[in-house]
Amino acid sequence: MPARRWSEMGALQRALVLAASVVQFALLGAALWDLRRRDGSQIRGPKRLWSGIVFVNYVGPIAYFALGRKSPEFVSE
């Protein structure tokens, strides 16, 4: 099935494409923001590697949040 042009899409299809784009960029932004503020010791693997992985559509940011961050170590008082 060939790709459809923007002008060939209906209003619902355009809205879905825009919504998917917003979600993708929100995930990317959140992952990059978290990587920047988090110390390297709180991340599994090199930060530079994860910085590249998060640019893989949807899969990268989700993988970072699911696998890349270490669990916080809670200190009992």
Image (cartoon, grey):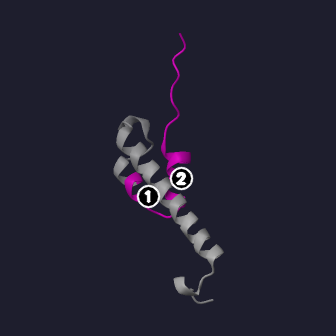
Mark 1 touching mark 2, by CB under 8 A?
A: yes
Relative to residue 40, is residue 19 drawn left or right?
Answer: right
Name the quarter where the N terminus is drawn. bottom right
Residue 75 x, y percent position in the rendering: 51, 17
52 versus 42 height, above or below:
below
Left/right of residue 59 with respect to residue 30 in the rendered view: right
Task: Specify the amino acid type for callout 2.
Answer: Ala
Q: Which residues are magenta?
A: 50-77
Q: Is residue 53 left or right of residue 18?
A: left
Q: Position of residue 31 (x, y in %)?
A: 45, 49
Give the answer, above or below, for where 28 lies relative to 57: above
Q: Quadrant of residue 34?
A: top left
**Element assignment for label 1:** helix
Residue furthest front in the image: 11
Residue on which disc 1 sits: 53
Q: Of the residues shown, which amino acid type is indicated by label 1?
A: Ile
User: For mark 2, what is the residue?
Assistant: 63
Instruction: Tell which of 77 and 24 is nearer to you.
Output: 24
Residue 42: mark in rendering: none
